[in-house]
Image: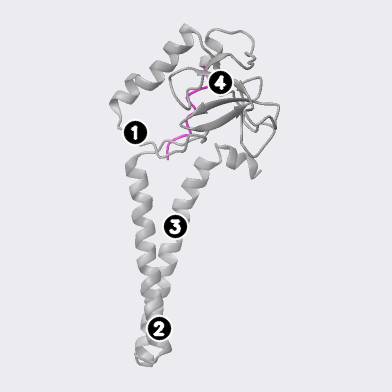
Amino acid sequence: MPNSIRTTSNTQTTTNSTPATFKAGNSVLCPSLSEAPFILTDDPYGTRDLLALTHDGSYFYYNEKGYFVKASDTETDDYQPSLFQNTEANLQAIATLYSGSQSNQRHVIDTTEADDNEVILMSAFDLSDIACDMESAAVVISDIGQLLGLIHYEKIDHHTAISMARLTHDATVTWYELLQSQLGSIKETLAMTRYGKEGK
């Protein structure tokens, strides 16, 4: 599976030698939401000492250094800032992210929510492979359930039940190993994200 990609890591350093600080009234860029600038405000509810911006009818919160803060938290758990100064250089860099050569070559279907600040890009082939394995495993589990039902209601004779149980055991072991292999690949990718770091 492909590596986790964070597209907002380098724009801050293109024009600044020190991290930017922000305050209400600043015009800022937030590439994870849009390529258009936003105007920062104080927390509209006045309950937290955070900055806010509005996107698609929702408020998104940040600290003075531009780090995203979840609506349920008072401090960030991000490792990189999400806000950048609204400069010409940063506008051009973000425009490249939205319309660069890579995106022209790929059809990207984005199913993330607006507040998802860490995403994983994976190919449709990999996703289809996982879905096929899950569907096949579900069919095997359904077959096992039907077999157990036949045995329970004594719909098949003793010798047939033994043979079917042996075949069922072999199929179960095979699909267990296949699903464990898929799970291992998924865990390797998740290990590069904050979910993997939280599990350490």
Q: Position of residue 172 (x, y in %)?
A: 43, 69
Give yes or no for contact between labels 4 and 1 (Cβ–Cβ under 8 Å): no
The residue at which mark 4 appears reads as 83
Q: Secondary structure at mark 2?
A: helix
Tell me if mark 1 has few (under 14), some (14-19) or many (20+) residues whose alpha carbon lies within 10 angstroms of its own. few
Name the front one of labels 3 and 2: 2
170 within the magenta span:
no
Residue 108, numbered circle: 1
Give the magenta part as a residue range.
Answer: 1-10
Residue type beneath disc 2: Gly
Q: Secondary structure at mark 1?
A: loop
CA–CA distance in space, label 3 to label 4: 40 Å
Q: Looking at the rendering, in which quadrant would you find the N terminus?
A: top left
Residue 183 or 32: which is nearer the viewer?
A: 32
Residue type beneath disc 4: Leu
Give yes or no for contact between labels 4 and 2 (Cβ–Cβ under 8 Å): no
The colour style of the image is one colour
Residue drawn 36% across and 83% down? 163
| Earlier-in-chain disc, 1 versus 3 | 1
Residue 63 to residue 95: above or below: below
| Earlier-in-chain disc, 2 versus 1 | 1
The residue at which mark 3 appears reads as 179
Name the front one of labels 1 and 3: 1
Residue 199 or 85: which is nearer the viewer?
A: 85
Residue 149, numbered circle: 2
| Earlier-in-chain disc, 4 versus 2 | 4
| Earlier-in-chain disc, 3 versus 4 | 4
CA–CA distance in space, label 1 to label 3: 27 Å
Q: Secondary structure at mark 4?
A: loop
